[in-house]
Amino acid sequence: MSKKHLILVDASAYIYRAFFALPSLSNSKGFPTGAIFGFTTMLLKLLQDFSPDYLGMIFDSKGPTFRNEIYRDYKANRPKMPDPLIQQIPYIHKITEGLNLSSLQMSGYEADDIIATVTDKAKKSGMKVTIISGDKDLFQIIDEDVLVADTMKDSTFGISEVKDRFGVMPFQIVDVMALSGDSTDNIPGVPGVGIKTASKLIKEFETLENLFKNLDSVKNRKLKENLIKNREKAILSKKLVALHYNVPIEFDFQDFSIKEFNLKEIERLFTELEFMSLLRDFVPKEQPSFKDYTPIFKREEFLEILHKLEGNSIFSIDLETTSKDPMQAEIVGISLAWEEDRAYYIPFGHDYSGAPEQLEFEWVSSKLKPLLESNGIKKVGQNIKFDYIVLWRKGIEIKNIFFDTIVASYLLNPSKYNHSLDNIALDYLGYRMISYKEITKDGKKTLPFNKVDISAAARYSCEDADITFILYKKLSPKISREDLSPLFYEVELPLIEVLSQMEIKGVKIDTGILKKMSTNIDAKLKELEGNIYNQAGGTFNINSPQQLGKVLFEELKLPVIKKTKTGYSTDMGVLSKLSITYELPALILEYRSLSKLKSTYIDSLPNLVNPETGRIHTSYNQTVTATGRLSSSDPNLQNIPIRTPIGKMIRTAFITEDGYLILSADYSQIELRITSHFAEDELLIHAFAEGEDIHTQTAAEVFDLTPENVTDEIRRRAKAINFGIIYGMGAYGLSQELGISVNQAKEYIDSYFNKYSGVKKFINMLIEKAKEKGYVTTLLGRRRYLKEIHSPDKNLRQFAERTAINTVIQGTAADLIKVAMINIHLKLNERFLKSRMIIQVHDELVFEVAENELDEVKKIVKNEMEGALKLKTPLKVDLKAGKHWGEV
């Protein structure tokens, strides 16, 4: 008879690891969810992969343990639990309860001690045990019936694995750690003795006690002296490391038996936390019987639908394709809906054995084209930009785009993490849709959509069109009630066509330049690698934070700036601080920057050239950033550094067709001009109106100088103050930016507000309004909700206040450039010009301009950008033309 299997989860350790693995996740209300999501997915995978008989969740308790009585400084270096993680702990316990999993914790003892106690009793009851943890302290429990599995690293340790790694038996790990210590838990060990030396000693002497009885046998004189000197530390360390097998805690193994989940509670929690992917997989979707979804195979059936469509003023459309890239996607089928709970699917691209005969796309599209291109019939879609581009490539232009549910959802709640159709349906209709994964999964394989059974495809695609139409009716009144109609109908919807045309046009690049750059950077990286190894005194994996941390802080003894749960932090902030004084961190930063640019742009851009057009086609994302700014992806053209030589070199690869030029139009100090408009500050408005250099002007005002006496360094400081203020930066942030004391930074800010009192009044008024309403709005009414504005947590509250300032200014800048883009697009089309807008990067627009149209396009661009919105402060645009992007 096989032994029963018990899983014990080191829950507290997994919470920390999940938090640092997924730190930036949050739901639409701004509540952090990364640790909860990581922890939950780990648990669900655990249950699926191991199928245990019993499972117990073991948590640490608050407060000191018996080890603190032995050694007061035990874990004294551990950083305080981050506030965003503290907020998530109650939900982790709720999810544990919802999954009907029993948990144990006890004050005065750590989770490891409870695990040791439960494991010992389980073995005596004839069970085998797997401990889920990444903590090597638990290796001392391993034997024939006990394993330690780190599911995050997909590794399992038994007796042989411990021997291979440490050279000793699992029960000897406690002696190894007594010698080597543990800086994370502040266990002293013997200074200078690492894991390797400790393992070698214990392998030879078997136990710590036997080692100290036979110190004369230690041949290394220096090591022997060190051991004699630190004997008491080693003995103390063993007491701290050794696990307690007799924790006085009551439990029953039957409580650990796997039970049915509380589906209602799990569904409630997943919905609140917006874990839509988990929710879909967790609770299977049943097709409602009242839905009428029909596949169309015959011409007469299609013509009947067409007749009904022609008699309607509005319908929704959804395409099913072979690819997520609209510039390469082929159409498999089209769904149409114009009344609730009914939709039609016209398949033409399903290709599998036994597939029924389908209508020809050319015939269907020729009949649909007049309706899709009619200005008299309104079109509704979910991310209709995708459909627009795919159909454009087939010779059809969707006109009168009246509603896009993804854009509507985004405007109603821009902080929401996900605006997918199934997510929106769940939020606003309480309706769970069929997932793409459900219909394309075939065992372990994922089918392309053209291989999906037509009946399943029809249900899926018709549901998309139907739910999109229902959501249009649901969200349209909400857009109106929230005073978002002008922004939605006059800016965001017209922008869809503009972005679509930019993506279709794409950008030409010179792959030869990039290949040459790649070779040169390889050589530079090799040179940097050699310099890094020379500075470090030996080779190591430069891309490993753990190895780098060991080199910097243990071998070279550089000052430790920050620690994480897993060891020393070597992030950009840490390396930047260290690089002021030390050369090696500066070399590492340069190496990382070059490596990233090489992999992200120089090596990847040539692979993204569309074989059909010979150009790169980025995707502009309208519903991602909370401020309203556009972002771009595949590739991200907005992150190419502009001020570094390498960034400028990458831009030289962005070229034009023969007979064309690149024209760059960049708003000058747009956010500062918007600030002066809102603040109605006379000093700022006057400076802009007179065309003065605003940073020099600020330097003169803040530092009480004449403009002639403002040096480059003083101007740089003034620039940091100007932008720091509009980004809501406080004294600490400014001190970090300028490398000065907090007091000095505070003096600068006070001096600024003393001179520009209108800005101070505006910021105070903005924060008060945000507290009163719970949200802020841009000049065109774009909203952003600020849940943390009333938080008792000072850090969260101050973050919300900074966000309020930044959103109004940056969001208005985003609105402004969108209006300009729409107006320029219209003017270029009205005049039948060949020139086209091809790139948008924050405050810059880039055009591919026919040489003989340059003067006319310059005039259009300047007029429309500077006249996009009427502000109290004049807008200014800098125009430059050249043969490639780097030149302008």
Image (cartoon, rainbow, N blue to C red):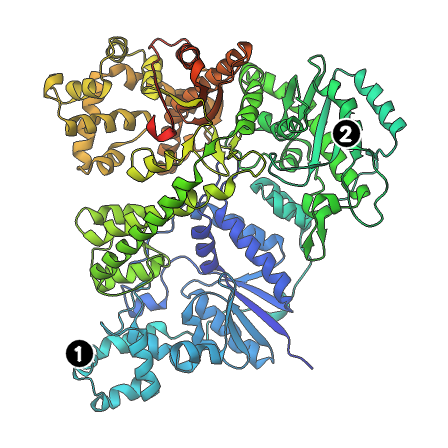
As drawn, the label of residue 846 is none
Q: Foreground: 138 or 512?
A: 512
The residue type indicated by label 1 comes to Lys
Mark with earlier residue (1, 2): 1
Q: Quadrant of the C terminus?
A: top left
579 up-or-down from 30: above or below:
below
Task: Point out residue 765 in the picture as x, y percentages from the top left corner.
Answer: 36, 18
Instruction: Note whether residue 188 is visible.
Output: yes
Instruction: Note whether residue 622 is visible.
Output: no
Residue shown at 18%/52% (left/top)?
A: 582
CB contact under 8 Å: marks 1 and 2: no
Q: Badge 1, how many Cα within 10 Å: few under 14, some, many 20+?
A: few
- Read off the residue under disc 2: 362
Residue shown at 28%/86% (left/top)?
A: 211
- Cα–Cα gap, marks 1 and 2: 88 Å
Task: Point out residue 616 in the picture as x, y percentages from the top left corner.
Answer: 50, 35
Direction from residue 737 to residue 11 in the image, left or right: right
558 up-or-down from 287: above or below:
below
Q: Secondary structure at mark 1?
A: helix
As drawn, the label of residue 229 is 1
Task: Point out residue 748 in the picture as x, y percentages from the top left corner.
Answer: 18, 27
The residue type indicated by label 2 comes to Glu
